Amino acid sequence: MAAKDRMAVLAAMMDQSIIPVFYDPDVEVCKNVIQACANGGAKCIEFTNRGDFASHVFFEVTKHFAKADPSVIMGVGSIVEAPTAGIYIANGAKFIVGPMLNAEVAKVCNRRGIPYSPGCGSATEIGYAQELGCEIVKVFPGSSVGGPEFVKAVMGPMPWTRIMPTGGVEPDEASLRKWFGAGIVACGIGSNLITKELLKAKDYAGIEKRVAETIALVKKIKAELAAK
């Protein structure tokens, strides 16, 4: 996956199923956390665009992994307008995620062959995102817009829809079984996966273990659902 083209990135996101969502202002902390996630099987990482100079941190981290571990696929989240999307794409982002739907962001991403997953909270927004060429639609905030029941309701009349919720997804069997049972293809998990306790302790081995266990759990759940 050296080229990390659009279709390869989308396939990697769906295969991985769990997308760690993370940001820290410290470049070295980011390198360690992202490497831990990659070692645990989560090669696709959503770096959130938050805080001053976040794009500079992203640039340094992405440049690092281009040499240290080219298998890492760096994406960026919390993108709300096209100029910011362009900055991150220039700095190496391979997918773009946002809390809301913005047609101009979709145009920039389509022009550059970059997957765009906008935040949607209704069937109308999801349909519009699909018109704009979004293959995986983010449902956000996942729990607030209706949770797994919302996903089921949308998948009924729109079974071609690929949904990735963020917000309200827990890295435990009960939560993951509900969401994937409803029909999602992936989910973003932030502090529920990369916890404050693990970060404070700089327990990168603990982060790797937690990520690996969560990904293994999802693969098991998906296999069981496919067998039904």
Image: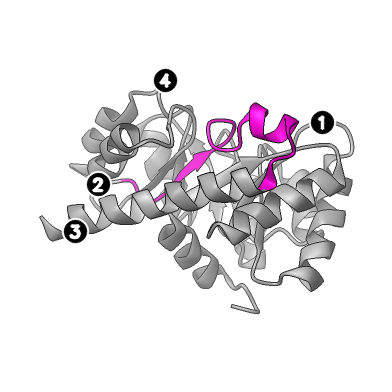
Q: Position of residue 175 (x, y in %)?
A: 33, 32
Check disc 1 and report the residue beneath it.
Answer: 51
Q: Give the answer, above or below, for where 40 lies relative to 53.
A: below
**In the image, residue 194 lies in the stretch drawn in magenta:** yes
Which three-letter amino acid code belongs to the residue tagged 1?
A: Gly
Tell me: 151 left or right of 83: left
Q: Quadrant of the N terminus?
A: bottom right
Q: Which residue is mark 3?
A: 226
Do the residues under discs 1 and 3 have CB atoms within 8 angstroms?
A: no
Instruction: Look at discs 4 and 2 and give the one toward the viewer.
Output: 4
Under circle 4, the secondary element is: loop
- Indicate whether residue 129 is drawn in magenta: no
Q: Is residue 154 left or right of residue 137?
A: left
Q: Nearer the viewer, mark 3 or mark 2?
A: 3
Furthest residue in direction left, as rendered? 228
Residue labelled with disc 2? 158
Q: Residues within 10 Å of mark 2 (few under 14, many from 20)?
A: few
Could you tell me if the residues under marks 4 and 1 are in contact, i.e. CB atoms within 8 Å?
no
Return the disc, 3 or 4, that comes first in the chain's sequence: 4
Residue nearest the observer in this picture, 80 or 24: 24
Q: CA distance from mark 4 to mark 2?
A: 21 Å
Image disc number at residue 144: 4
Q: Amino acid at mark 3?
A: Ala
